[in-house]
Image (cartoon, rainbow, N blue to C red):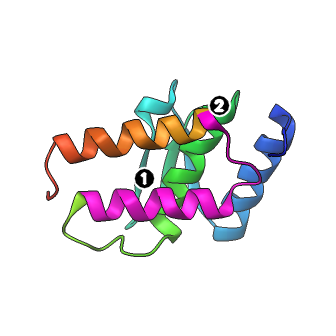
Amino acid sequence: MKTLTKEEMRRHIQHMINKHGLVTSQCDRPSQAWASRELEEICIPPIKSAISYAAALHEIGHIQGRYQTSRHSLVRELAAWRWARQQALTWTPAMERTCASSLAWAARNGGTH
């Protein structure tokens, strides 16, 4: 597992934003991040850790990943996390815990909406 600096993570996220032509805004924490596929817009926290890096990749995954038009939120979440994991330059245990926690929350809060 490669250890990335904050700057490397920031550069990678900026590259992905530019590559996909996304509109971005900033939120305070990873738990506040969101994506709008229709607007090709993401709201992500400053990239300060592997957690915020994973959150940013996940939100990009909601726009670029497969199955994002599914009516089942759990399908969309799984696909966005899969996309994030595939695109990440590294995937740490903390990133995996964030993914698992997010998916558990999605499963508890209904599979459709």
Amino acid tagged 1: Ala
- Residue 39 visible, this angle: no
29 with respect to 101 (left or right): right
| Quadrant of res 7 | top right
What is the spatial separation of the Cα atoms under label 1 and label 2, in whole angstroms? 15 Å
Percent across and percent down for residue 63 are 47, 66
- Residue 8 visible, this angle: yes
Percent across and percent down for residue 69 are 30, 74
Instruction: Classify mark 2: residues with Cα within 10 Å, few (<14), some (14-19) or many (20+).
Output: some
Instruction: Classify mark 1: residues with Cα within 10 Å, few (<14), some (14-19) or many (20+).
Output: many
Q: Is mark 1 on a helix, strand or loop?
A: strand
Q: Give the range drawn in magenta.
A: 74-93
71 with respect to 2 (left or right): left
Q: Is mark 2 on a helix, strand or loop?
A: loop
| Quadrant of res 72 | bottom left
Query: Within the magenta stretch, is there residue 88?
Result: yes
Please give the residue where the numbered disc 1 appears in the rendered image.
35
Amino acid tagged 2: Pro
Please give the residue where the numbered disc 2 appears in the rendered image.
46
Q: Is residue 21 above or below residue 113?
A: below
32 with respect to 45 (left or right): left
Residue under the image location 17 percent in, 56 percent down: 111
Residue under the image location 42 percent in, 42 percent down: 100
Image quarter hosting the C terminus: bottom left
Query: Within the magenta stretch, is there residue 44?
Result: no
Residue under the image location 59 percent in, 52 percent down: 57
Q: Nearer the viewer, residue 13 or 26?
A: 13
Q: Which of 67 and 24 is in front in this view?
A: 67
Q: Which label sits on residue 107?
A: none
